[in-house]
Structure formats: C-alpha cells, structure tokens
Amino acid sequence: MQEIELNLDFSNTAIAFEDKSNEELKKMATLFGLMNKEWLVNIGAKLGLPAVKYNLPFSQSIVKKTIYPQFVGGRTLLECQNAIDRLKAYNILTVLDYGAEGKEVESDFNNTMNEIVRAIEFAGPNTSVPVVSTKITGLTKNIILEKLSAGKTLNSEEEYEYDSLLKRLDVICNKAKERSVSLFIDAEESWTQKAIDDLVEKMMERYNVSEPIIYTTAQLYRHDRLQYLKDIHQRSSKKGYILGVKLVRGAYLEKENKRARKNNYPSPIHKSKTATDHDYNEAVRYCVKHFEEIASCNASHNGLSNQLQAELIHKMGIQKNHKHLNFCQLYGMSDHLTFNLAKAGYNVAKYVPYGPIKDVIPYLIRRSQENTSVTGDMSREYKMILDEMERRRMS
C-alpha cells in the first residue's frame, strides 16, 4: 500500500532504462556480465593502474571502449555536456566530480584547484548542475593529512604546505558561495579523515550561514560516524550555520580492515553489513527529522535506504523536492533508483566523474572492486539489465 501511495517502484525497469536504446542496453549487458566475474575484476584491478600509468600498448584504448564511457562523463567539462543533457531530459540533476586524487606535487594541487573552480563556474548558470564534488587528497599531500589526523606536529615545510591547502580550499569554497553552487567534499581513509573533518567544519562555519554550500561526508560503515553526525549537528546549531552532509556507506572497507590488521589496531569499520545498514538508516532518519537544520544527500545504491527516505518524507508531509532532502547515485549505476526517484518527483542526481583516463582509473578500479566483492551491486545491475532486455523481448 505504501509503495502505491509513494508512486515509487524500484523494480520498474521500463522507467529505469527508458533513456537507453536496445544497442546501448546490449553493451551494458556485456560489460556488467564481465564485471560480475570477480576473478576478472581482480586481474583488471592489479594490471589496469600500472598499464595506464606506463602507457602500455592498447591499455588506454581498452579502458576507453569499455568501462570508461559507462562510468565517466568525459575527459573535460564540455564532453560532460551530453551526459548532463541526457539526464536533464528525465529531471535528473548532475554532480560534477573531477577525478583527481592522491596527488603529490604543488603543480598538480594547483591544477586540481583550478579545475574545480572551472567546474563551479561551469555549473553556476546551469540549473541542472547544482553541485561539484572534490577530494582533499587532490589538493595536498597525504602525509600532511595523516600527521594532522594523528595529532602530530608539522615541520616548517609541512606548515607551509598546510597553509597552501587552506588557501586552495578557501578559494574553491568562496567561488562556490559566489556562484551559489554546492560543494561535496568526499570522505577518505580513516587515517586522514580527522584532518578532513576539521577542514570541512571550518569551511561550513564560514560559508553555510544562509544556505548549504559546503557538505561534509559521513561514511556509515565506520562505527563512530552516526555519533559524529549528531555531534556536528549540535555544533552547527550552536554556531548558527546549516549543516551540509552527504551520507555514504563507504568505499575503502577492505583497505581499512587490512591496514588495521597489519598495524594491530581495532578496525574503525563495523563488523557486519547489518550494523552498517542499521547506522546508515538511522542517519537517514536523523537527517530527515532535522531537515530544516540539516541539508542532506542520501548517496546510496541500497534500495531499502532510498525507500526509507522517500517514506519518511511522505509520512512527515514534506515537499518531495525540498532543497534539503536529496538523493544521488553514481553515473552508470543504479538507474532503477535514480530514474524512478526522478519520475516520482524527488530531488535526485547522478554523480558524474570526469577527467583523463590516467586520472580516473583509480576511481574506476575502486568502483569495480567495491561493487563486486563487498556489496554485490554488479550482480544486481546485471540482473536488472537482463530483466529489461527480456521485457523488450530482445534476444
């Protein structure tokens, strides 16, 4: 009964793939069929990064013809326009994400800053691109964030580099405020996250006084993040700014657990998926309950978590497209969620990465590994595509 009232059915593949031609659907079926083989993904992950890095023969062309167009909007902002327009035709917004991370030299950090500023300027007049996303590791060295997160003192050279990071981040946030474009700042590994949290809170306090410009990210597979969400809400209320938060489960599960075992400390990750799901859904409930003070984005590929937020909005009588209540899924995945949410009238966006192949390959590898070995999303994607092909009576 609830599903009929909400007019929301995530099993509706006709809506999920209505923008795809038969030929496009067949290509997706082939790709997801391959990605559903974990052994093949593992081989690709081990060989893909060095192959592209050292420009081995055919490596970039293989990536460009297979996984790249499925999950990446294009090499440049202008190349993303086609994806942006296709999504807009179905009332789906775009979150632009320049795929740079893990850089180590000043010129790269400045290039990343300039690219993010260009993305904000590109998004400013474009109502279908309300958000740009970035990673702090694209703007400074990992060692700076690690030392700050561990409470260690920076040396004079590192202090200079940290000041440079603050300036870069403030330039980006100021430009976002100037153009009324929101900025999602991604969460990263736990050993750098404390420094990232502190930086983002500083920027939110400065720029979120009248509207939610800056968003932090809470990874709910960490057992401390639900409480962290409540704590930063209390701090934002006391300081008088709107809290912006993107909710995710998390993208570094195996890496986090492996490092914890190696260095003999308790893993920050929940011991079970059930515990992660519980905290994620509690975070959704908390954000919707406090929707006037918290601007949130439910960035999940989990159907139950998306259904939960839709039901809460419905039960509380909140406008479906309230600007503080948003959904988001990755470009090239979970179209059954995105397109059905858009059809039902909710604020929903696709997270669209862009950049040269050599810059986005770590993102592509992480997506394939995470979704195959941890959440099983590839199996679900593959089944949905096959269901739609059967519905269309495609051979």
Image: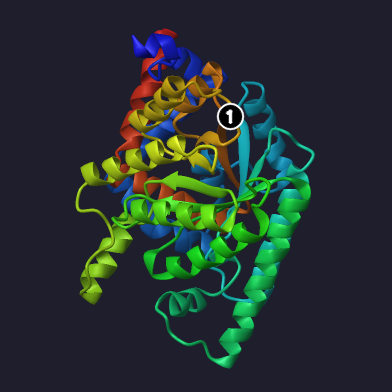
Q: Residue at x 61, y 59 (%)?
A: 205
Q: Is residue 276 left or right of residue 106?
A: left
Above or below, 236 against 162 in this view is above
Q: Image quadrant for the C terminus?
A: top left
Which image quadrant is residue 334 in?
top left
| Left or right placement of residue 136 versus residue 301 in this view | right
Residue type (three-letter) at the residue carrying disc 1: His
Mark 1 sits on what residue?
Answer: 322
Q: Could you say which quadrant of the image residue 111 lies in?
A: bottom right
Residue 194 percent coordinates (x, y):
44, 68
Q: Residue at x 52, y 59 (%)?
A: 52
Give the x, y percent position of residue 299. 46, 40
Q: Which quarter of the figure has residue 301?
A: top left
Camera-side residue: 152 or 102?
152
Q: Nearer the viewer, residue 319 or 67?
A: 319
- Residue 334 appears in the rendering: yes
Question: In the drawing, does residue 354 fall left or right of residue 143?
Answer: right
**Residue 129 image offset from top left, x and y in percent:** 68, 38
Q: Position of residue 69 (x, y in %)?
A: 56, 39
Q: Which residue is found at the position 47% from the left and 49% from the top? A: 364
